[in-house]
Amino acid sequence: MRDLRGKIALITGAASGIGLGIARACVDAGMRVVMTDVREPILREAASALRASGADVLATQLDVSDRKAWASAAERICAEVGEVDLLCSNAGVNFVGATHEATYEDWDFALGVNVGGAINAVRTFVPRMVARKIRGHVVITSSVSGLFTNGGAGVYVTSKFALVGLAESLRADLRRHEIGVSVVCPGPVKSQLFESTAAVRPSRLKETGSVPIVPAGTARESTPIYITAPTGEETGRRVIEGVRRNAFYIMTHPEIRPVLEARSAALLAALPDEPVERGRVDASAGLLDASLYK
């Protein structure tokens, strides 16, 4: 999808942060943009700001964990704007705390939004893209927490690892349809993820084992990790650049290299140091096809 002008982009979680950054980058590329978010007032404000610059934007409230809501949203989007060419599953919530202290409610909430939301996006729109025989593109927002962990956020990490697997599998399945798939794995970004997580968490799932991300009395915006983080707009531009290149992985923080190298080395070191019969290799030829990653 090198030529994006006039194409239609759908972005979930688009009211702020990375989602809004992707929306702005799509507008700059000349695309028509559909912005969705569960937070309707903030979504309306964000969409109005883009329209003020002359953008062609439709804003529609959407709880990505609600499959019936997806069906209704698809009907409205296709009727009012048209079929989607670029699908960006970006909506997500966070969790900070020990894995073993997470409640069932923590798991249901995070997996329902982060993983369930992406599954719902794919199931709702990708078959339509395939049926139209277009050269479309799918973007799934994961995280560096989908590539490695150091503890303290097991619920979030589990959901983000799942999204990397989803994106990789989808890319493999869609290659023959000439539909690209990218997985975005950003490090810390200036966003309202922690605040929005608290704002959208249903009361029926309020019991939690999470802990505050910063000490009481400390403004998160004043912490070094926030101050040095790239903005949602910067990240959004990287995403659209990646879409144009059909990039498999879209990264934002080169400083994670040593951790990726250490994890890769640990995986390789764990392989048994023993010969394998040729027959077993041949029997697993499909499983051992590495072409997706080359």
Image: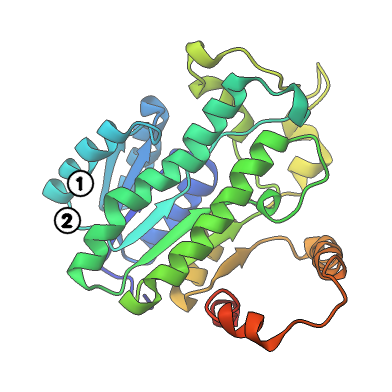
Q: Tell me the residue at 52%/21% (across/down).
A: 199
Whether residue 58 sits left or right of residue 113 in the image: it is: left
What percent of the width, then of the height, locates residue 291? 55, 83
What percent of the width, then of the height, locates residue 253? 73, 60
The residue singled out by tag 1 in the image is 77
Q: Are marks 1 and 2 in contact (CB under 8 Å)?
A: yes
Whether residue 104 sits left or right of residue 20 in the image: it is: right
Disc 2 is placed on an element classified as: loop
**Residue 5 vertical placement versus 68 (above, below):** below
What percent of the width, then of the height, locates residue 196? 55, 28
Q: Tell me the residue at 79%/43% (across/down).
A: 225
The residue singled out by tag 2 in the image is 82
**Residue 291 vertical placement versus 102 (above, below):** below
Q: Earlier in the sequence, mark 1 or mark 2?
A: 1
Can the viewer see residue 14 in this picture? Answer: no
232 or 269: which is nearer to us? 269
200 or 163: which is nearer to us? 163
**Residue 224 vertical placement versus 179 (above, below):** above
Disc 1 is placed on an element classified as: helix
**Residue 235 vertical placement versus 111 (above, below):** below
Name the mark on residue 267.
none
Q: Residue furthest left?
A: 79
Tell me the crowding category of disc 2: few under 14, some 14 to 19, or many 20 or more residues within 10 angstroms, Cα based: some
Q: Please state which amino acid type lies under the numbered disc 2.
A: Gly
Q: CA distance from mark 1 to mark 2?
A: 6 Å
**Quarter of the C terminus within the rendering:** bottom right
Tell me the crowding category of disc 1: few under 14, some 14 to 19, or many 20 or more residues within 10 angstroms, Cα based: some
